[in-house]
Image (cartoon, coloured by chain):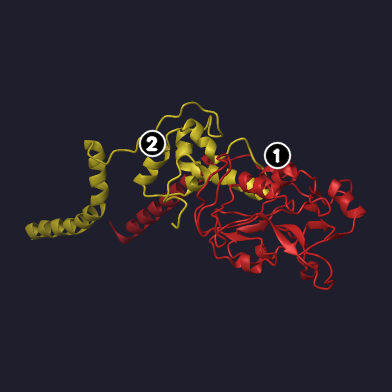
Chain colours: A red, B yellow
Amino acid sequence: MNRRGFLTASGGALLAGGACALGISEVTRTISPLGHDIQPKTGIRRGMVIDLRKCESGCDACLKTCRKENNVAFHGDKRWDIHWIRKVSIRSRTRASTSAKDVPLLCNHCDNPPCAQVCPVRATYKRADGVVIVDHHRCIGCRYCMVACPYGVRFFNYKENPDWVTPERPRRSHGVVESCTLCAHRLDEGRDPACVEVCPHGALTVGDLNDPDSEVSHLIASNSTKRLREDLGTEPKIYYIGL
Amino acid sequence: MSASGAEGGRTRIAVVVVPIVLVLLPILVSLGGSVLGTEAAEPFLAVPVEGVGDCDGRDVAEMRFHHMDLLKRIRDQALRHGVRGDTQIRDCLRCHADREKFCDRCHDAVDLHPDCWGCHDPTTAHEEEGGGR
């Protein structure tokens, strides 16, 4: 074989190989499962109104239900316990006479979530409906979001959850950060979050803040509401009445 | 002259053939093994009870190669877009009841250890799964 022949043959072989590779990738692409492409819901801005006038200080129905609904880990040790919703005592700094208030505290699902901004792997993000959630498949457990969150409502799984109370719902593995999802799985099915559903006093309401006819909008319009640390510019979407 | 020419030709052929054979040796051995039936046993997958999930009606080969894409798609649609279909990962086990036979054999054979069940299946969750891998 002379040089010309060799070059022609090898060039032809290269072309054929390339065509085969392209063909294979094309075939792989075409038979890969093409699910239905569904557009996310837009225009909705979900938020919550907590009426502290109705919320009773001794009651922990929402806390218990949340733990059960979402398999939130409880180890009985402050260092490792996880709370998607918890009650904290808040006292006014300016008015010394006022007594401390028991306030349910949960993820504020901020419009400008600092946790999502700092996440290096985009595991924390804001959904189209304004709910801020963690993709635990993607979370690397760096805990930047816990540092960034001004409300201290994010928790790290230092340990595996020993109990799996609700088998239908997933649990989180060791090494990821978690927080309230506003029961996104329920919202997607058109149901209210577990805490809202269970509250015996009707103190919690969830709805679309963009919709002027929604219950939350009415509550916000007809009452004096406050949000936590509004000064930070995070635009939290949990509104408190009577704080 | 002609004898030495033939000698040179044989050397040249040997110089070409020997490296080619050496390079192809592993492939040839595995091919020979499969022909003679001495290769490692193909992981056996348990036959599903009945088809109800998203994989229903899908080609077996397609599922074999692309089930992870389908799972990721279901996951991303649920998590990122809030679109939760009828099928979730735990539903796989409704038909493919024996996880040991259906998932683990193949994954073990290719030394892959996805962490699905550590969080998604309370009945067969292993201690080591979902841990600090």
Residue B101, numbered label: 2
Q: Which residue is mark 1?
A: A189
Q: Height in image: A211 above or below B50?
A: below
* In the displayed structure image, the side of residue A182 where residue B53 appears, left or right: left
Q: Position of residue A243 (x, y in %)?
A: 82, 61
Chain on which label 1 sits? A
Q: Is residue B77 visible?
A: no
Q: Quadrant of residue B40?
A: top left
User: Who is closer to the viewer here, A199 or B48?
Assistant: A199
State which quarter of the image contains the C terminus of chain B: bottom left
Q: Position of residue B56 (x, y in %)?
A: 53, 30
User: Who is closer to the viewer here, A93 or B1?
Assistant: A93
Q: Height in image: B86 above or below B114?
A: above
Q: Quadrant of residue B20?
A: bottom left
Mark 2 surroundings: few (<14), some (14-19) or many (≥20) residues within 10 A: some
- Residue at 32% x, 38% y is B42
Q: Of helix, strand and loop, which one carries label 1?
A: loop
Q: Position of residue A112 (x, y in %)?
A: 74, 63
- The amino acid pointed to by label 2 is Lys
Chain on which label 2 sits? B
Q: Position of residue A234 (x, y in %)?
A: 75, 65
- The amino acid pointed to by label 1 is Glu
The Cα atoms of the two marked residues, 2 and 1, are separated by 33 Å
* In the displayed structure image, the side of residue A37 where residue A52 appears, left or right: right
Mark 1 surroundings: few (<14), some (14-19) or many (≥20) residues within 10 A: few
Q: Of helix, strand and loop, which one carries label 2?
A: helix
Residue A47, numbered label: none
Q: Are marks 2 and 1 in contact (CB under 8 Å)?
A: no
* In the displayed structure image, the side of residue B29 where residue A60 appears, left or right: right
Q: Is residue B32 visible?
A: yes
Q: Residue furthest top?
A: B50
User: Who is closer to the viewer here, A157 or A76?
Assistant: A76
